[in-house]
Amino acid sequence: MLRERFTQAMKDAMKAKDAQTLSAVRMIMAELKKRDIDARPKGQMDGIPEAEIGSMLQGMVKQRRESVALYRQGGREELAAQEEAEIAVIMSFLPKQLTEEETKAAVAQAVADTGAASVKDMGKVMAVLKDKYTGQMDFSSVGPLVKAALNG
């Protein structure tokens, strides 16, 4: 389970005196705690489910990638490097990411499975992909691939 992995990673970072990793893991745990608290009124007293934790991590990676781009535009390379280090720590908790070829094959399979014929069916295809591949692909880059498959 991811929760145990976060705790273990925090302990390992403390023992290794790895301040950067420790900071990133604490940031992940703080976000998880916030989401667990937000889920309580919805009846999720044990915290958010594992799949939602994966989505949370994906979102954190996306935020940091956007920050890296902005820092680079502003000439703040040291801040961009710090964000990239956080991305590496967050990514270590996610399942192996699909390669570009594997992503294209997954998109083609999802289009075939749903019988999608036009861009109007893009939502169906994306839903199938999210069900099967959450945490394994960057959905911000998948959208254009799905659109191309449906137009092409």
Image: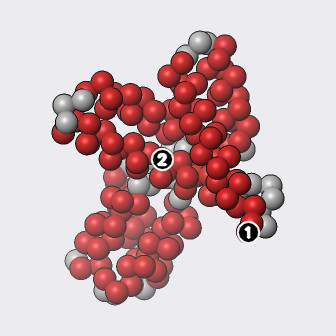
Task: Kindly tell me whether residue 106 is visible in this rendering.
Answer: yes
The residue to which callout 1 is attached is: 42
Task: Kindly tell me whether residue 92 is visible in this rendering.
Answer: no
State whether residue 115 is above or below residue 143: below
The residue to which callout 2 is attached is: 60
Q: Quadrant of residue 77?
A: top left
Whole-percent x and y of residue 142?
Answer: 36, 62
Which one is in front, 74 or 99?
Answer: 74
Whole-percent x and y of residue 104?
Answer: 35, 61
The residue shown at (38%, 33%) is 84
Type of amino acid at the residue the image marks with label 2: Met
The residue shown at (51%, 66%) is 130
Viewer-nearest of discs 2 and 1:
1
Type of amino acid at the residue the image marks with label 1: Lys
Whole-percent x and y of residue 148?
Answer: 25, 72
State whether residue 120 is above or below residue 102: below
Q: Quadrant of residue 152?
A: bottom left
Q: Quadrant of residue 140?
A: bottom left
User: Mark 1 or mark 2, which is nearer the start of the sequence?
Assistant: 1
Q: Is residue 61 left or right of residue 80?
A: right
- SS for tag 1? helix
Whole-percent x and y of residue 134?
Answer: 53, 59
The residue shown at (19%, 36%) is 74
Q: Quadrant of the N terminus?
A: top right
- SS for tag 2? helix
